[in-house]
Image (cartoon, rainbow, N blue to C red):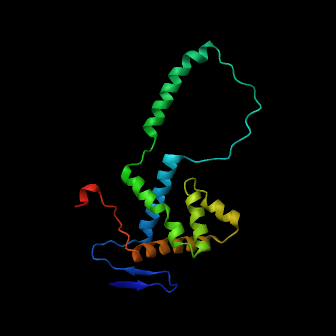
């Protein structure tokens, strides 16, 4: 059953009896998870520097004695605080990686805003990125909402299931 049609022609939202309908909130949640998983598995990459002009540090005996204790404590703290995604989260992230190119290929401005949002959301730098672009904040957020809704409409038209089936669910 057709629920509604958008005036810009981006797609149709279907009302599924199983509740298998993509919304903008669900798409944003999946994209946030994708960024979190990608950063946890690959890390952020920065441009390589030229190195330091400082001379090499030569440790003395007391540095060598305490170094092992400090490294062990640091490695333990890092391992306890590190986020490790589950296999289901990795599957969900892989599924959402292609959404931008698949559903926003006819909307380059919306795709650019979504890319900027994904790139700058962790550090809270999205507003600074908007200022650097010299665009209106309202316009950017409106395009972001439109891009997420366009993806949700495309997922609904393609009948992509909201939940990834688990191995135990398959018969």
Q: Is residue 38 left or right of residue 170?
A: right
Q: For residue 155, which quarter of the picture?
A: bottom left
Identify whether 90 is placed above or below 106.
Answer: above
For the point 24% across and 56% down, the residue is 168
**Relative depth, front residue between 156 and 145:** 156
Task: Measuring from the top left, give residue 66's x and y in whole percent.
Answer: 55, 18
Task: Measuring from the top left, give residue 35's x and y in whole percent.
Answer: 50, 55
Task: Measuring from the top left, give residue 73's x and y in whole percent.
Answer: 48, 27
- Counting labels gives 0
- Residue, far left: 171
Q: For residue 21, which quarter of the picture?
A: bottom left
Identify whether 104 is placed above or below 34.
Answer: below
Query: Which quarter of the image is occupied by the C terminus?
Result: bottom left
Q: Is residue 98 left or right of residue 47?
A: left
For the point 29% across and 57% down, the residue is 166
**Relative depth, front residue between 97 and 114:** 97
For the point 52% across and 47% down, the residue is 42
Asked if residue 138 shows in the view, the reply is no
- Residue, far right: 53
Query: Which quarter of the image is occupied by the N terminus?
Result: bottom left
For the point 60% across and 60% down, the residue is 126
């Amino acid at each position: 059953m057709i629920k509604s049609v958008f005036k810009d022609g981006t797609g149709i939202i279907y009302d599924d009896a199983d509740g298998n309908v993509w919304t903008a909130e669900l798409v944003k949640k999946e994209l946030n998870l994708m960024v979190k998983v990608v950063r946890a598995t690959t890390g952020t990459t920065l441009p390589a520097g030229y190195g330091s002009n400082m001379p090499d540090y030569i440790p003395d005996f007391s540095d060598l004695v305490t170094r092992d204790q400090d490294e062990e404590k640091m490695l333990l703290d890092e391992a306890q605080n590190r986020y490790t995604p589950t296999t289901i989260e990795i599957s969900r992230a892989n599924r959402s990686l292609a959404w931008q190119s698949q559903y926003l290929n006819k909307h380059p401005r919306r795709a650019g805003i979504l890319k900027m949002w994904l790139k700058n959301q962790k550090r809270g730098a999205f507003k600074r990125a908007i200022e650097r672009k010299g665009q209106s904040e309202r316009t950017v957020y409106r395009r972001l909402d439109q891009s997420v809704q366009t993806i949700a409409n495309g997922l609904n038209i393609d009948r992509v299931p909201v939940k990834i089936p688990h191995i135990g669910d398959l018969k």
